[in-house]
Amino acid sequence: MVGALETTATFCATGWDELLELVRREIPWCTDRTVEWTLSLPSYADFDEATLRPRIAHSYEAVLAGVQLRRRPLPSDPNDSFVAAGADRSQRGVEPAEMAAAWRFGQDTLYARASRLVDRGPHRDQLLREFLELVMSWVDFALLAAAEGHRRREITEVRRLADEQAALRRVAMLVARGVSPTEIFSAVSDEVARLFDSEHTAIARFEGNEAVVVGTCADIRAPSVGWRVELDDPLLITNVYRTGQPGRRWALPFGPVAKYLPEGRPVGTVAAPIEIEGRVWGAMIVWTPEELPADAEQRLETFTELVATAIANVEARAEVQRLAEEQAALRRVATLVAREASQAQVLAAIGEECARLFGTEDIRMVQFDGDSQIVVASAGRSAYLFPIGSRQPLGGVNTATMVLQTGRPARIDNYQAVASGFLGEAGRSVGMRSTVATPILVEGRLWGAMQIGWTRESPLPSDTESRLGQFTELMATAIANVQARSDLATSRARIVLAGDAERRRVVRDLHDGAQQRLVHTVVTLKHARRALEQRSQDAPALVDEALEHAQEATDELRELAHGILPSALTLGGLDAGIRALASRMPVSVEVDVRAGRLAEMVESTAYFIVAEALTNVAKHADAQQASVRVRLKERVVHVEVRDDGIGGAQADGKGLMGLRDRVVALGGALSIESPAGDGTQLSASIPAPGTRPASTAAG
């Protein structure tokens, strides 16, 4: 009897080891089936096969390792491996019920495979029963441990979320109270340090190729507010700046920040971008002496997404305040313009408003005149060097010259090192370190520039160009209004003078010409009547002489009338009038007029534009041919006169200035392009309200 029991025990031990070995060989098969079934569960949708397979295989190995020990009772403490598995499933969003279902399916799969592997024999049922009982016990043990890991992870996650929400509420309260940006950034840094159990955190704002620290936690070793670091390739924050993605690093500290961190041991660093209105505004950085958890980037990124709203609110409040101040400044200047203050008063007011808005130590507004500038407003350190009304030469390396050359905003941050020319030397002499200039465009042309600068070590803020540019755009309207009023007064004076001169010419021509002929006619007719009364033979000759004087007076009156408004224009319209002009030209003129009868004022203005242009061609252009093109489009008459002459025509000639006054008076515009050696093109547009396009093309 004893021998039989020993034989049975020996067989069971041998069979047990053989069964375990056979089952271990089937782990890949069991894993395949379990992976396929598990991925069908909704909670496992976040997993892929490559991720899930090694985790399930590891769970099988852990269960079989416990079975091999044949321990009864099972350990009282949860196994770390199973706890970690449950925490892993929790982190990936797997529900507890579906996690249990997946483990049970794995257990059933193992049962089925083991049942097929046990050899037939007298002790088969005993061996299989014991094996299956132990498998079930260890699966239950593993499932309970995994559930504990799942629960712990859920509790930790809830606690972390609660801490983050509490931190957010504290920051939101500060924002609601309207505290300064500096206080907000410091509070955010402290909250992140508390959440990550770190002594070193910072918020950095990206400015050009630099990161500027705007907030740190309270620890004295942290980088101070205002500290700047250049965005070099090795730095983690540089990668965040370039990619807009979070990142981490575990290494010995290096670079400019190393002096603030513990020496001689690795440091965990994680950085996440702070995005505001779709742009990477800056980054949150955390340094810890311990290795960072796997979800550190996600946690930090989630928190920065929350606090980005607070930062955006702070910036928005500052932006609203800035816009309000700019609008107030604009209203003050607009009031001066409305009161028709002088241009000097308006420009001086603009300079004062910009100095107040930007808080700079030096400000200057200049008007460009050829290769020099004329100071129209000046305040600050260099005002004594640039008094209002003074003229300075442009050239060298300075922001005013750069604006003149490019028509774009310009900046020099290392002014003491690179500035040159008269303006550069003057700026260096008063200690300028950073200057910005923006163009002032009046009616589409480069009128001048607004320049600001200061002597501080740090450069002007990176948004200075855009802010100053927006302000100068607003102020350009004021300058244009002042200039337009001045131009209008000058134009009116020219029109009055031209009208007076024309009247004097007509009076002179009448007096010297037709009037004298008519006087001679009257005198001759009186002599003829006396001769008839005396029956003198001179009477017919005197009548003939009177007729001759009358005819000459008529001809002179007709010529005089032509100088005012030609009969071809009056009777035949613009096409006939221009063709009559072209017929008297010494060069070939191609005429293409596609406009019907127009209002008298529009028609005469278009005619005189062509007449003046063709007169200039004949007198000055040295051209071989010219062309006249007139179109009526959308109730606007477009006149274009071209020639192939030597070019170089002056837009401020007396004749063209008079024409421009007439065109502007009708609400139109006149321009001239005349590059040297490439001919001249004169273009004009004249509104023709109430006019319909001609039904047929003339010419």
Image: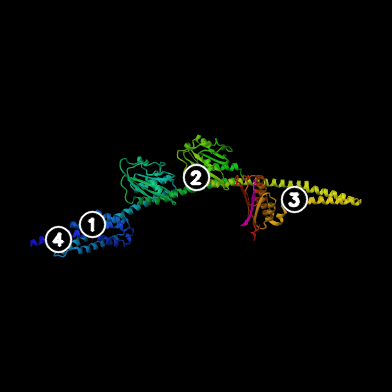
Residue 27 locus on image (x, y percent): 24, 59
The residue to which callout 2 is attached is 465
Mark 2, residues whose alpha carbon is within 10 Å: few (<14), some, or many (≥20)? some
State the CA–CA distance, disc 1 to disc 4: 22 Å
Residue 220 locus on image (x, y percent): 36, 40
Rendered-image quadrant of the C terminus: bottom right
Left or right: where 680 falls relative to 218:
right
Q: Three-letter amino acid code at disc 2?
A: Glu
Q: Three-letter amino acid code at disc 4?
A: Cys
Q: Secondary structure at mark 4?
A: helix
Q: Three-letter amino acid code at disc 3?
A: Glu
Rendered-image quadrant of the N terminus: bottom left
Picture layout, residue 55 above or below residue 393: below
Q: Secondary structure at mark 3?
A: helix
* Residue 61's disc number: 1
Task: Check contact, mark 3 vs mark 2: CB within 8 A.
Answer: no
Task: Check contact, mark 1 vs mark 4: CB within 8 A.
Answer: no
Residue 303 locus on image (x, y percent): 38, 51
Task: Check contact, mark 4 vs mark 3: CB within 8 A.
Answer: no
The residue to which callout 4 is attached is 12
Which of 633/313 is in front?
633
* Residue 559's disc number: 3
Sequence-first tag of 2 and 4: 4
Magenta extent: 621-634
Q: Secondary structure at mark 1?
A: helix
Judged by its main secondary structure, the magenta piece is: strand
